[in-house]
Amino acid sequence: MTARIVGLLGVLLLLSGRSHAACSDPADLGIDLSEQAHCDPLVPERCMLPFPNDYFTVADDTSRTGRRVHFTPEGLPKNKRGVPLDAVELNRHDGFSPGAALLVWMPTVDLVRSAAPGLTDIGGSLGPDSPVVAVDTRNGRRWPVWVEVDTNSPPENRALIIRPATNFLEGHRYVIALRRLVDGNGNTIPPSPAFASYRDFLCTSDPTFESRRRHMEDVFITLRRAGVERSELQLAWDFTVASSHTLAGRMLHIRDDAFRALGSRAPAFTVTSVQENPAAEFRRRIQGTFQVPLYLTGNGVPGQRFALDASGLPQRQPNPFTATFTCNLPRNDGGPARVSLYGHGLLGDQSEVNGSLVRSISATYNIAYCATDWIGMADEDVNNAIAILGNLSLFPSLADRLQQGFLNFLFLGRLVRHPDGFASHPAFQVGGVAAIDPGELYFDGNSQGAIVGGALCAVARDFRRCVLGEAGMNYSTLLHRSVDFDLYKIFLDLSYPDPFVQLLSFDIIQMLWDRGETNGYAEHLTRNSYPHTPRHTVLLLGAVGDHQVSEFALQVEARTIGAAGHIPYVAPDREVGGEHGFGITPIAQYPWAGSAYFLWDTGSPLSPLENQPPRDGHDPHDDTPKIPAVQALKDGFWHRHGLVQDVCNGAPCTGPQF
């Protein structure tokens, strides 16, 4: 008998629960199992790969998915001082991030020779011959992905990155397969000995290794049903996506608990400053404080985390959080102004609401803007952010405070809407008449304000229409494609100098970041609303060649929330491939009543396809909000029954550089 037949007989014995006696010693097959307690032997070169991976979960009948993440300190990435990521908060999850990058170790792969689907050929990942395949096990359907290598690492140490072109679905399990990938010489890359053992029925005498075999057989069966043959596989594994309870459960809990305690009252607020004619476009600037139930320990300053009960839910503290606000009333005599909340940019503060991104639209279209700080990622959080870069185990403090920040915004919105809120105060009145219309509240977020603003919009009750400008989602994708990361990477490099460790670490902590940014809420942003939450309509705006927030991440967001796109997306000579339109349904006709995606081109150089930021030429990041056509677009959208108009007149959307 051949070794394969002997092995197959051994496998059949094992699956029937009988002896390992007929099987080989793993070492004789080249399989290293010395670290299998915390590393997956399928990829022996790098612990934790492939990632995400149900190898790092355990069965849990009490979770929504039936799984529970089970990381061990020995396997998790460590900083230079040998401190691993803290597994406690991560292990509360019942699955992995819906936007997770799938990481594999194949540094010799040649993606061009392998015909792997890239950003310019996402649709190729759904083709019958795609060398990289993702399958949803609930229905056997292929999932769109693109493949790239980590260009931040030296060529000999580059991980393979498989990114979802549309976020994976909550609670679903996916099987990933790699086949027919070749190196630069055209040679097929061999599977690891461990994977070859499972694929080729080469049984071993190790009970722990063999206990996984039945599960691997299920993986192979799933792939065969999807048209992927076992014999051509180089690697295959599976992972489970976290449930909405894991991703948004805490935020929904504090929202519901806080508003239940508030009841029918308006939040308490105090006006501390009234400034007349602070700018040519503004009639009045009003500043003050307001009280919000606090769910963080202490007094909620940067670095503090949720106060959790035994079930892991945040508990309301005896004393409230005192938040601050800034509101600008427009210089416009058109009657009471519509109001928009405003979300500021990266590690900034509410004073951005006084600046050039909103002044013109405020005065032209009679829109009052109110802002508070995005605590968790505001200027006062910079020192905590730097501390986190030295020890990523501190990251839960950022995610927790972001969620408290969402609640602050929700209470600010209630102050706008409630008859006993802002409109009842003389500072918000002109001639004894309210200068704002409590019936119309919207949201406008730019850059970071859009990245986290989508999550806020998904849980909002007092506003239903949101503009997310200079937008995107999924920080683990965005960071390496943003020039903003240059400064913070200096601090990260001091503690985590290995680019691969950085890549893996960000992919892991995205599981926590999901609680505080759009990536974890996108599935419920415009459809499948959370309980006790209205349906929202979203206008997504981005720029070609944005140096700070990648338009590629925005396109993933558009596909995930089902936004329809304005076409042509860009001029033919500005198209770098089919990725701008793949999976984004064109707007069928104008005016359009649903969520929409617009890409604006101000002539900047095109973004690189690799995981690098654009650096050449003009950065168009802040151009979009200042374009008159964009302001007209937002004006038409911001009404109770607002509509999206074709402000680009059937052509690609272009505008001047500012």
Image: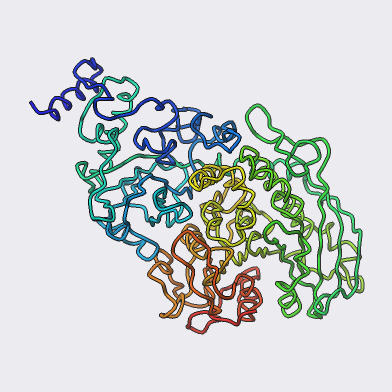
Q: What number of labels is visible? A: 0
Above/below status of 26 relative to 228? above
**Which residue does the image show at 72% across and 34% down from the upper left?**
307
Quadrant containing the C terminus in the rendered view: bottom right
Image position of 312 (left or right of 118): right
In the image, residue 550 lies at what x, y percent?
53, 63
Image quadrant in which you'd find residue 246: top right
Check the image and report above or below for 631 versus 246: below
**In the image: residue 487, left or right of residue 283:** left
Quadrant hosting residue 84:
top right
Quarter of the image holding residue 389?
top right
In the image, taking residue 634 as reference, residue 56 lies left or right, namely left
The residue lying toward the viewer, choosing from 306 and 252, is 306
* Image quarter of the N terminus: top left
| Residue 586 at x, y percent in the picture | 43, 71
Query: How far across and how far down the image is residue 342, in percent?
Result: 71, 63
- The answer to which of 119 and 455 lies nearer the viewer is 119
Q: Say whether residue 482 is left or right of residue 339.
A: left
Relative image position of residue 540 (x, y in whole percent): 56, 66
Q: With respect to residue 150, does 593 lie above or below? A: below
Residue at (64% x, 57% y) in the render:
487
